Image: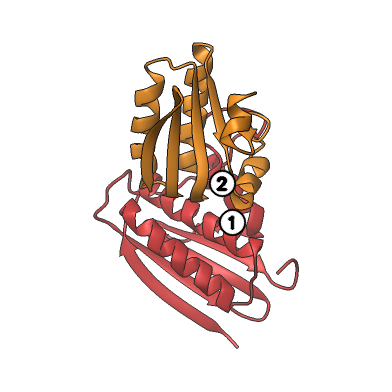
């Protein structure tokens, strides 16, 4: 069975708390439990924060679309925006041994999602695809 | 997020509650740096009621730590929940931040 949900929200950081609540609940409905739910919640929050910060450069009047899909094999979250194109070659977290502000969000996303990639075919804005395969440490 | 500054027997304690994220971390930064700019010898951060922290919140504390170290002061955290401790450990910041079980342990360290 395939479950899916689509929401859109303004690119204002005040809505991130709503995204977190929703993401945690959806992850629970998809069968995740405990720490994994917290990791998914943090990862999606970081991905949305990156859109606000980098794609929309802090403009709080834009739109972010989130699509959650769950099948027996995988849990997918897709984020879409119409902001500045992300250069996936430049997106990497900082060395964790290096102590400086910033550069952790990408690590939080990679920690829980097996796939973290941009849809390069998209011509306007960005489509970020996050996939977690099921049946591992759910 | 709520921020309260408490004077505990002459020690400055920053008591935080709620979620620290991209929305609330600018306020935290302002409060934190507003205290550290006075070059207090030690600032104690109470995490007991903090339910969530993201990379922007962590970045704020790393910035505060760098500043406090620049003048030889100390930034000391206490009463951190397991969930937030896991994030600090994953980020390898548990080795960088001074973390204590409670305020007394922090003060007596």
Query: Toward the viewer: A31 or B20?
Result: B20
Query: Toward the viewer: A32 or B20?
Result: B20
Seen at 46% across and 71% down, the residue is: A67
The chain assigned the colour orange in the figure is B
> Image quarter for residue A5?
bottom left
**Image: B81 above or below B3:** below
**Image: A3 above or below B19:** below
Q: Nearer the viewer, mark 2 or mark 1?
A: 2
> Image quarter for residue B105?
top right
How many numbered marks, from 0 up? 2
**Color scheme of the displayed model:** by chain
The percent coordinates of residue B98 (x first, y second) are 62, 29
The percent coordinates of residue B3 (x first, y second) are 37, 41
Q: In the displayed structure, does residue B89 sit left or right of residue A18?
A: right
Q: Colour of chain A?
A: red
- Image quadrant in which the N terminus of chain A is located: bottom right
Seen at 45% across and 31% down, the residue is: B13
Mark 2 residue element: helix
The percent coordinates of residue A98 (x first, y second) are 63, 28
**Image: A50 above or below B33:** below
Residue for badge 2: A106
Q: In the displayed structure, does residue A12 sit left or right of residue B99?
A: left
- Image quadrant in which the C terminus of chain A is located: bottom right
């Amino acid at each position: 069975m395939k479950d899916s949900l689509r929401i859109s929200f303004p690119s204002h950081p005040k809505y991130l708390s709503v995204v977190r609540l929703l993401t945690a609940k959806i992850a629970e409905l998809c069968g995740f439990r405990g720490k994994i739910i917290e990791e998914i919640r943090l990862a999606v929050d970081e991905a949305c924060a990156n859109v606000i910060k980098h794609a929309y450069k802090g403009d709080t009047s834009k739109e972010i679309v989130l699509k959650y899909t769950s099948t027996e094999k995988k849990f997918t979250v897709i984020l879409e925006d119409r902001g500045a194109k992300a250069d996936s070659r430049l997106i990497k977290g900082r060395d964790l041994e290096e102590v400086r502000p910033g550069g952790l969000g990408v690590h939080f996303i990679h920690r829980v999602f097996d796939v973290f990639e941009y849809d390069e075919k998209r011509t306007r804005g960005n489509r970020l695809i996050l996939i977690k395969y099921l049946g591992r440490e759910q | 997020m709520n921020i309260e500054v408490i004077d505990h027997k002459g020690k400055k304690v920053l008591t935080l509650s709620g979620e620290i994220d991209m929305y609330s971390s600018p306020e935290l930064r302002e409060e934190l740096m507003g205290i550290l700019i006075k070059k207090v010898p030690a600032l104690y951060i109470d995490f007991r009621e903090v339910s969530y922290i993201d990379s922007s919140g962590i970045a704020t504390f790393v910035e505060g730590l760098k500043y406090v170290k620049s003048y030889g002061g100390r930034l000391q955290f206490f009463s951190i929940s397991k969930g937030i401790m896991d994030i600090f450990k994953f980020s390898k910041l548990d080795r960088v931040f001074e973390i204590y079980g409670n305020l007394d342990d922090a003060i007596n360290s």
